[in-house]
Image: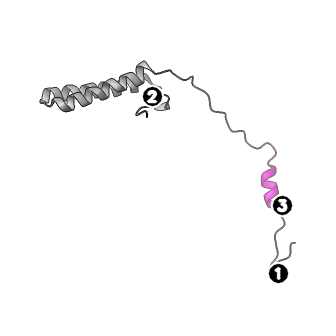
Amino acid sequence: MQLIDPNHPAYQRLWVRVGIVAVCFGWAAVEIIGGDPFWAVISAAAGAYAFYMLFWTFKPQPQSAEPVAQPDAGGEDEADETSAEKPSKDGQAE
């Protein structure tokens, strides 16, 4: 089970990956200064895991351009819908 999927598009930017790791290690420093070593170790472990997943095993995927949707050239779909026979008030097609 992976907690961080390094192939997710949110992690493509370098500043996002650096920020996540920096926040984890920064919080570990805050906990050490505050005198709570348990949470400092937990935060440092999260930072180490984030570093491993986002830098060590990270393989950047090439940016693929999304295909642009082409508008209908003939507009036949709209014509088919409007040319369908409509039933009259007595239930028979006109």
Is 14 rendered above or below residue 10?
Answer: above
Marks 1 and 3 sit apart, C-alpha to C-alpha, by: 20 Å
Label disc, if present, on residue 49 of the rendered structure: none
Q: At label 1, which amino acid type do we have?
A: Asp
Q: At label 2, which amino acid type do we have?
A: Tyr
Is 81 rendered above or below residue 11?
Answer: below
Marks 2 and 3 sit apart, C-alpha to C-alpha, by: 50 Å
Tell me which label, 2 or 3, sits earlier in the chain: 2
The residue drawn where x is 54% and y is 23% is 61
Tell me which label, 2 or 1, sits earlier in the chain: 2
Mark 1, other Cα within 10 Å: few <14 / some 14–19 / many ≥20? few
The residue most toward the left is: 35
Q: Position of residue 82 (x, y in %)?
A: 80, 60
User: Mark 3 highlights which residue?
Assistant: 83
- Nearest-to-viewer mark from 2 and 3: 2
User: Mark 2 highlights which residue?
Assistant: 11
- Nearest-to-viewer mark from 2 and 1: 2
Magenta region includes residue 92: no
Is 58 rendered above or below residue 4?
Answer: above
**In terms of secondary structure, where does tag 1 sit?**
loop
**In terms of secondary structure, where does tag 3 sit?**
helix
The residue most toward the bottom is: 90
Mark 3, other Cα within 10 Å: few <14 / some 14–19 / many ≥20? few
Q: Answer whether residue 11 is visible to the viewer in this image.
A: yes
- Along the viewing direction, whichever of 11 and 43 lies nearer the viewer: 43
Q: Which residues are magenta?
A: 66-90
Marks 2 and 1 sit apart, C-alpha to C-alpha, by: 63 Å
The residue drawn where x is 22% and y is 28% is 41
Q: Position of residue 63 (x, y in %)?
A: 57, 25
Residue 86 sits in which quadrant? bottom right
User: Mark 1 highlights which residue?
Assistant: 90
Q: Answer whether residue 15 is visible to the viewer in this image.
A: no
